[in-house]
Amino acid sequence: MKYASVVFDTLIKKPLDYSISEELTQEIKIGTQVEVLVRGHQRTGYVFAIKEHTDYPHVLPIKKIISSEALSSDLLTLALWMSNYYCAPLSQVVKCMLPSSVRKDIQPQQQIFLTSDMPKKKLRDLSLELTQKHPAQALVLSTFLTSKKGIFLQDLLMKTGVSKSPIDSLIKKKIFKEQKIFLDLPLENYFLSEPKKLNEEQQKALKTIAQDIERKIFATHLLFGVTGSGKTEVYLHAIQKVLDQKQKVILLVPEVALTSQTIERFKTRFHNKLAVLHHKKSHGERSHSWKEIFQGNVDIVIGARSAVFSPLPDLGLIILDEEHDLSYKQTEEPPTYHARQVAIMRAKIASCPIILGSATPSFETFYNAEHHKHILSTLSQRANKAPLCKVQLIDMRLERMKNQSSYFSEALLEGIKKRYTQGEQTILFLNRRGFHNFLICQKCSSVVQCPHCDLSLTYHKKAHLLRCHSCGYHIVPLEKCPSCSSREHFEYKGFGTEHVEAALHKIFPDIRTLRMDRDTTSKKDSHDQLFKEFRAGKADVLIGTQMVVKGFHFPSVTLVGVLNTDGALHIPDFRSSEYVFQLLTQVAGRAGRADLLGEVLIQTYMPENSTIQQVKDQDYRSFYQFEMENRKSFSYPPYTHMVKIQFSGSDEKNIRHDAALFRKVMIEKLPKNMIIHPVIPSGRYRVNNIFRLFFIIRTKNIVHTTRLLQEVKEKFSLTKDNKLLIDIDPVSTYF
Ligand code: ADP
Ligand code: ZN
Ligand code: ZN
């Protein structure tokens, strides 16, 4: 008799043993999704180990197999590692890996496309013939005839209102032909584009990577190349190598870079089966993609963070583009994984190389490259030999004295005007949306706050609302101060994208603008649509938040203006400078990517700040060295690991109590040389009436620390309704 350890994706945290009956022995493998009884209830779980013995005296049998295409053994090995490293129950990790549609076994809607080889005339005659005896079939045929080339089965069913059987009969009679449409590929094929001839640096990088692809060994490669240096071109060549040896590839990109422009670049190069994993997909589409990928029918998977769990067999390469991007980290729920770390582990398990690409690598990654844990390849020039653009700082303190507008410096306005008269384009970046950031009473100094969050309300002019950017609460703008009832001292302050757009129109009445922020991109595809319009020259200026930074290439943009970033540098987090440097370098990279020379203007109230100065010089290495001195002397990552232990709940006193108690237990357990920070409120202490506190542990031995944490967590009884989140290697020590 054999036994299976079964792990669940529901509240049951521990795996349980079940016996495998004679007839199921052949079919049950690691990863098979099965149905079993747990305390009298039917549950689904996944086989994660098969063994000859069990320590339990009364094991129940596995009732039946639900799916053999849920998890591969590679993924289960990965899940085990994640469960340990991220201090999360295996059940939660499995839940995070599998799309809910796969877990619940939602059947994909069949996307069947019906065509016919018969001439139209013949079909019309047939339809008439069938009218008497088989009216439903006749109706189906006449409806089919209204389509051009063919029709989706779903559409045909909906238009005719008949059941599927008349259609089946027509298929049986060979009048209709069924064609299963692969959901991720649009019907039309792209014309293939030729690979580019790589320049010397690109060739050298490719050669280094290709060796590991051919030898099928694990190694982490860092492709460090300035924006526009042709990193993507190197990925494309590397992918070709993998496909040539009949293996498969995962390509991870930041969520906002998952645009049609990015995808087209891959689709036009390879006619292989390619799946794009969007979070906008329906459940049916997702479970269909998952199965197709599992069966080995997909050669290339492109997706954001969670695509790292795609169940590809024969994995030959993983690529993680923009590896420094924060969207790779899951922060709100366990497991608090980082796709970079998980991807590296996945590559190790699959025995294949992985490429991390960036113009501004995270310090963790660059540190590993310097210490030869990663293999470094550098692309130091833009692929088309275009010089990197000039970055100029503008001291807004001086501007304030000489001109009225508090948003635009003279130089920036001159620059915009010049581009606009020459038919070139400008991007304006600022990290605030809305019209005014807050409403303040100059008499009593009170600011209008969200009643549920520690955040001031932002004025949105078009909607004519005061809105909370955290919880969505909104009200009609107030007429008088809620504290002192003053009317005349009530003023709007600060500016967001909406205001900048309006101000620009006041200065240049004919200027054409597009705005891109969360307010203008809430609809599906609107993000893509805006970019297409801008690229097609439908506007002179694109005004936007972080969203404008990634995944796009605009040949006619020759000026990038940064309106404000000082705020981000004031965030008390040891990584603030690193993040600002990355962001501004990316923003600056949008300018002058084709043959036109680019210019970048950064407006700041602190031009002497060292980070701002280093952005100006665009010298990553010297920035890295400078910052690493600090990291080293304060024992911050990457010299240590951090763990953030966060408590949240609706009662302030209760979470304080839990946090203090947990911390006390940890202090008793942990060795003396570990640093345990005090409990502090999160930078956004109250969101939607939920309060958050945390404390940080700094440790050199992360494995030991997580093991202790796991022990303490299991025994710790949280006050009812409070939540505990363990965030390993957190990306923020402020929020
Ligand atoms: P990155 O990914 O580093 O930002 P890309 O791969 O997007 O850079 O390359 C920037 C531009 O240079 C693209 O338009 C690309 O087609 C072009 N390019 C890249 N490599 C070459 C090459 N070897 N020869 C000519 N053009 C190239
Ligand atoms: Zn007041
Ligand atoms: Zn709110």
Image: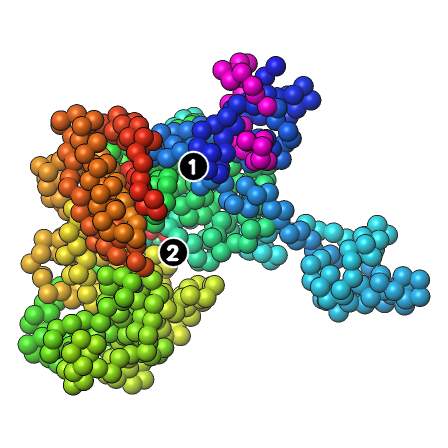
Residue 508 visible (yes or no): no
Point out the stretch of residues depicted in magenta: 37-60
Q: Is residue 278 above or below residue 237?
A: below
Q: Position of residue 215 (x, y in %)?
A: 43, 26
Q: Earlier in the sequence, mark 2 or mark 1?
A: 1
- Circle 2 SS class: helix
Residue 256: assigned label: 2
Look at label 2 and name its amino acid. Val
Q: Which residue sits at x=12%, y=77%?
A: 442
Q: Is residue 342 left or right of residue 613?
A: right
Q: Position of residue 286 (x, y in %)?
A: 55, 48
Would the CB of label 1 be found within 8 Å of ligand 3? Answer: no
Residue 484 visible (yes or no): yes
Task: State which quadrant residue 722 falls in.
Answer: top left
**Image quarter (top left, top right, bottom left or bottom right) of the N terminus:** top right
Q: Position of residue 318 (x, y in %)?
A: 42, 38
| Colour approach in the figure | rainbow
Location of mark 1 (residue): 93
